Image: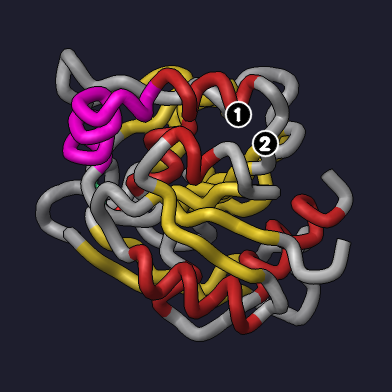
C-alpha cells in the first residue's frame, strides 16, 4: 500500500487538525459523513470534540450502524479524546442516550480530570512511540477507568492528582488517546496509526 486513505469522521470536532497530522506522516485523507464515503477508506480517525454531539449526529444521519459494522469488520480506527469515548465499550458520566462503537474493551470516564482543571499539558512515557517523551495536551479529557484483558495500555499520567491514570490504549486495530496529538505538531501517534493501517 503506498499512501493509505484515512477517513476523518466529519460530523463535529477538530477534523482539520487530524487531516494535517495524517498528511504530515504520508497518508491521504478524506472526510466521512456518509456510509458510501466510509466504505472507501483504509482507516478511520474520530477527532476530538464532543462525544455526545458526535453520537447524536451519527445516529441522526444513519451513520452509527455503518460505523459499528466497519470497526467490527476490522477497519483500523484511531480516536483522540471525544474519539476515544466514541471507541469505548462503556462510558461513565455520559448522556444516557449516548452511543459508542465498542471497538475498545474499556470503560472511559468523561471529563474525568475535573472541572477545576479543564485543560492541562504534561509529558508522557509512551514506549510504543519511539523518540522520547510525548508532550500531551488534555482538554476536558476522559481517562480510561479500566480495561479488559485484550487491551494494551500505551501510556499513563505520571505525576499529579491523576498519576497512574490510563490515557492511551490499543486493542487489535483500534487505538485511542485521551490527549490530542493533532494539536501539538508531533506526528508520532498518527504515524503509529498509519503503520497499523498499512499492516492492517
Ligand atoms: N469532554 C468531551 C466529550 O465528552 C471530550 C473533549 C475533547 O474531545 N477535547 O466528548
Q: Where on the picture, by quarter, is residue 137?
A: bottom left
Label 2 CB less than 8 angstroms from ligand 1: no
Q: Where on the picture, by quarter, is residue 96?
A: top left
Name the one closer to the observer, 16 or 37: 37
Q: Mark 2 sits on what residue?
A: 75
Q: Mark 1 sits on what residue?
A: 71
Q: Residue at x 71, y 77 (%)?
A: 26
Q: Residue at x 77, y 69 (%)?
A: 3
Q: Residue at x 67, y 73 (%)?
A: 188
Mark 2 closeness class: few <14, some 14–19, many ≥20 residues within 10 Å: many
Q: Which mark is residue 23?
A: none
Q: Are marks 2 and 1 in contact (CB under 8 Å)?
A: yes
Identify the magenta region. Answer: 51-64
State the image coordinates of residue 30 (x, y, percent, origin top left): 50, 62
Name the one closer to the observer, 191 or 138: 191
Camera sees residue 70: yes
State the image coordinates of residue 4 (x, y, percent, origin top left): 74, 62
Classify residue 94 as left or right of residue 19.
left
Classify residue 114 as left or right of residue 15.
left
Q: Is residue 39 above or below residue 67?
A: below
Q: Callout 2: helix, strand or loop? A: loop
Question: Residue most toward the front?
Answer: 36
State the image coordinates of residue 36 (x, y, percent, origin top left): 49, 38
Name the one closer to the observer, 73 or 128: 73
Label the magenta part by its dominant secondary structure. Answer: helix
Q: Quadrant of the N terminus?
A: bottom right
Camera sees residue 164: no
Answer whether residue 63 is magenta in the image: yes
Label 2 to label 1: alpha-carbon separation: 5 Å
Amino acid at each position: 500500500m503506498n499512501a493509505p486513505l484515512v477517513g476523518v469522521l466529519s460530523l463535529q470536532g477538530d477534523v482539520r487538525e487530524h487531516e494535517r497530522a495524517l498528511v504530515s506522516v504520508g497518508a491521504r485523507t478524506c472526510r466521512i459523513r456518509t456510509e458510501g464515503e466510509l466504505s472507501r477508506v483504509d482507516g478511520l480517525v474520530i477527532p476530538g470534540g464532543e462525544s455526545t454531539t458526535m453520537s447524536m449526529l451519527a445516529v441522526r444521519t444513519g451513520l452509527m450502524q455503518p460505523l459499528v459494522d466497519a470497526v467490527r469488520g476490522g477497519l483500523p480506527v484511531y480516536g483522540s479524546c471525544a474519539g476515544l469515548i466514541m471507541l469505548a465499550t462503556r462510558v461513565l458520566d455520559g448522556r444516557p442516550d449516548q452511543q459508542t462503537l465498542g471497538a475498545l474493551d474499556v470503560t472511559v470516564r468523561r471529563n474525568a480530570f475535573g472541572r477545576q482543571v479543564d485543560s492541562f499539558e504534561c509529558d508522557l512515557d509512551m514506549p510504543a512511540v519511539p523518540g522520547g517523551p510525548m508532550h500531551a495536551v488534555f482538554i476536558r479529557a476522559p481517562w480510561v477507568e479500566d480495561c479488559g484483558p485484550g487491551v494494551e495500555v500505551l501510556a499513563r499520567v505520571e505525576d499529579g492528582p491523576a498519576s497512574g491514570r490510563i490515557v492511551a490504549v490499543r486493542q487489535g486495530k483500534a487505538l485511542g488517546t485521551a490527549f490530542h496529538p493533532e494539536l501539538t505538531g508531533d506526528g508520532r501517534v498518527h504515524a503509529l496509526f498509519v503503520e497499523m493501517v498499512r499492516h492492517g
